[in-house]
Structure formats: structure tokens, C-alpha cells
Amino acid sequence: MKCSGLNEEVKRRAKELEAANKQLSSANEQLKIHDKMQKEFINVASHEIKTPTQAILGYTEILQSILRKDSKFLMLCIEMLTGYKDLQTTF
């Protein structure tokens, strides 16, 4: 009789373990999908940020080289920026 009760207990626990393993396997698959989506998002976001940043850096280098050569252009840029700031405070 004791063996019968022990066998039933072993079967019950084996079923519990099997169910827990299925849940863990499912959760693991969901985490893999989430991880893949996260990596794809980071790659896209990184590219979307990098592209305009490279253009800004390029224009900055061009402006720096022009400003080093032409002080009149530098003054014009300062006046434009100053005027723009004044417009910002008016609105």
C-alpha cells in the first residue's frame, strides 16, 4: 500500500514538473522573441540617429572652415543668430 501511494506521489510530481517545464519553455520563447525585437529596435534607432548626426557634423565642418576664412560671414551668422533669438523671445 505504501508503494502505491508513493508511486502516485511520484506521478503527480512528475506531471507538475512537466507542466512547469512547459511554462518555462513558453516563457523562454517569449523572452527570445522580445530580445530579438529589442535588438532590431536598437539597430533601427541607432541608424536613424546616426544618419542625421553625420550630416550635421559634415555641415559643421564646412561652416568651421568657411568661418576661419571669412570674418564677414562670421558676423552675418552672429547677427542672424542674435536676430533669431530676439524673435524667439517675442513669440
Image (cartoon, rainbow, N blue to C red):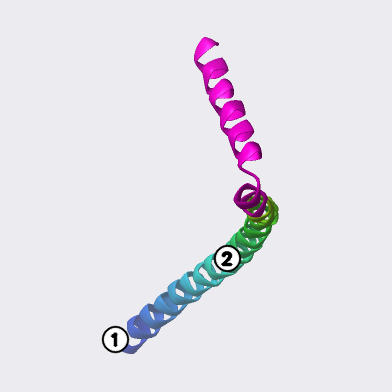
Label 1 amino acid? Answer: Lys
Q: Nearer the viewer, residue 4 or 87?
A: 87
Residue drawn at x 62%, y 59% as measured from the top left: 46
Q: Read off the residue under disc 2.
A: 35
Give, as a single range, the part of the protein colored magenta. 63-91
Image location (x, y in percent) of residue 21? 50, 74
Classed neighbour count for the residue bearing mark 2: other residues with Cα under 10 Å, few (<14), some (14–19), many (≥20): few
Position above or below: 81 against 12: above
**Residue 2 placement, left or right of 23:** left
Label 2 amino acid? Answer: Asp
Quadrant in the rendering for residue 31: bottom right
Mark 1 and mark 2 lie on one chain; the one further toward the N terminus is 1
Position above or below: 46 against 6: above
**Residue 24 placement, left or right of 70:** left
Q: Read off the residue under disc 1.
A: 2
Residue 46 lies in the magenta stretch: no
Quadrant in the rendering for residue 16: bottom left
Image location (x, y in percent) of residue 63? 65, 48
